[in-house]
Image: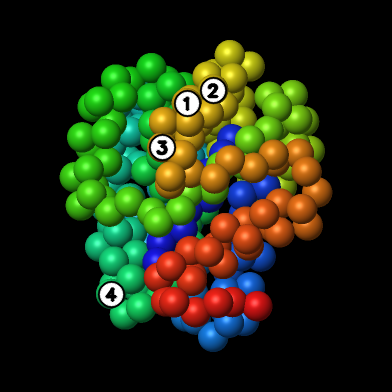
Amino acid sequence: MFITIEGCDGAGKSTQAKELARRIANLGFEVVLTREPGGTPLGEQLRGVQGWLKVGGSVSVLAELFLFEAARSELITRVIKPAIRRGAVVISDRYSDSSLAYQGYGRDIDLSDIRKLNSVATADLLPSLTVFLDIDLDVALDRQASARGNIQNQDRFEDENREFYQRVINGYRELAAAEPARWLTIDGEASSEQISARIWTAVQRLIQKHTGTITP
């Protein structure tokens, strides 16, 4: 079973991914919690590249996309697919939909081109469930600003303008609306407890569908 959590920077994805991993592990399942970019030595190196971009480095928008796709392919090959094959539940903080939102809607790369690259990088592996934490632009920017004191939370996208982030948010909303069977849209401005409860309700149904077991 494969679950992804998506949303604009500042939506609270990492917090919800960790809480969901804890709940599923408490049921006795092996849980693999990963992130994009990251999860492998190559992916973690890419996070370092993001730091370099933050302090004045520059790459073309296509080069940026190819970097993410390379890291994604490595994550699929070395972490996600092996975990799924052995029966683990995989939770990823971001996945291929983030490239559609950020590099597609945000940076205006043709969506069909990104989908082709995503298909190759992921070998067409789609999540069973994608949770979208939807927040207002001003809330997202406020949360990003409050996080800037921690260098680990800084990346290239935090210095983008309002129009860029609004395109990203709108892109996520369009993606979610186009695939309602896979996407679960949640108000990211609700309390953390309310968000966790909604996610857990959906995941319980998913576990029952996959295993036939009703979870507590």
Q: Is residue 26 left or right of residue 146?
A: left
The quadrant the N terminus occupies is: bottom left
Foreground pick, 176 / 6: 176
| Mark in front: 1 vs 3 | 3
For marks 1 and 3, give the CA distance: 9 Å
Type of amino acid at the residue the image marks with label 2: Asn
Q: Percent position (x, y) of residue 161? A: 61, 17
Q: Are marks 2 and 1 in contact (CB under 8 Å)?
A: yes
- For disc 2, the marked residue is 170
Residue lying furthest bottom in this view? 28
- For disc 4, the marked residue is 85
Residue 9 visible? The answer is: no
- Give whichever of discs 1 and 4 has the lower sequence position: 4
- For disc 3, the marked residue is 179
Around disc 3, counting alpha carbons within 10 Å, would you say few (fewer than 14), some (14 to 19), or many (20 or more)? few
Mark 2 lies on a secondary structure that is: helix
Q: Residue at x 62, y 81 (%)?
A: 26
Type of amino acid at the residue the image marks with label 1: Glu
- Give whichever of discs 4 and 2 has the lower sequence position: 4
Q: Vertically, is 142 above or below 127?
A: above
For marks 3 and 4, give the CA distance: 25 Å
Type of amino acid at the residue the image marks with label 3: Glu
- Give whichever of discs 1 and 3 has the lower sequence position: 1
For marks 2 and 3, give the CA distance: 15 Å
Q: Percent position (x, y) of residue 216? A: 65, 78
Foreground pick, 15 / 61: 15
For marks 2 and 1, give the CA distance: 6 Å
Q: In the rendered view, how is the structure colored?
A: rainbow
- For disc 1, the marked residue is 174
